[in-house]
Image (cartoon, helix red, strand yellow):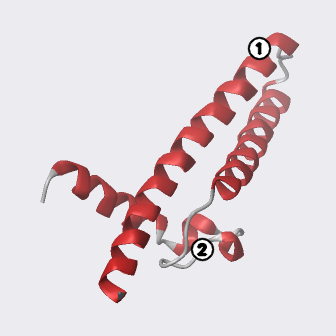
Amino acid sequence: MNSSSRIVLIMNWISDKDCLWWPLLKLRPSQDQIFSNKLVIILAFIATVIGHSIIIIIRLLSGKEVPLDVAIVITIILFLLALTLNKFTSYCWNVRMKALSVKQA
């Protein structure tokens, strides 16, 4: 087993955890379904909103104002990180899905 297939196995093991999908468990495709780009975008947007909400809470607790340009940059970085992670997860998911469909055929 090469290192790339180990990474795919690890990512799929992580993405199969129900607790990581909560409260979006209904959005998770079954193992034999494709992980679509639409789902990648939806999850990246949700992760960005959650991350930005955490930043707002920290800002409110600290009492310091965050300049608008900094908030915009943070939001863009959060979205790109979430998009990259979700796209990699979908790649690993789809590798497994294709392998399962070959075994079933």
Q: In this view, does 16 lie above or below 56?
A: below
Q: Which amino acid does label 2 sit on?
A: Pro
Q: Is residue 55 above or below residue 67?
A: below
Question: In the current view of this chain or complex, which residue is farthest to the bottom?
Answer: 104
**Residue at (35% x, 88% y) in the render:** 104
Q: What residue type is labelled 1?
A: Val
**Foreground pick, 8 / 20:** 8
**Badge 1 local density, few (<14 within 10 Å), some, or many (20+)?**
few
Q: Quadrant of residue 11?
A: bottom left
Q: What residue does disc 2 label? A: 29
Numbered tag placed on residue 33 in the rendering: none
Question: In terms of secondary structure, where does tag 2 sit?
Answer: loop
**Foreground pick, 28 / 61:** 28
Drawn side of residue 99 relative to residue 62, left or right: left
Question: In terms of secondary structure, where does tag 1 sit?
Answer: helix
User: Alpha carbon of mark 1 to alpha carbon of mark 2: how far?
Assistant: 35 Å
**Residue at (61% x, 67% y) in the render:** 21
Q: In this view, does 23 lie above or below 104?
A: above
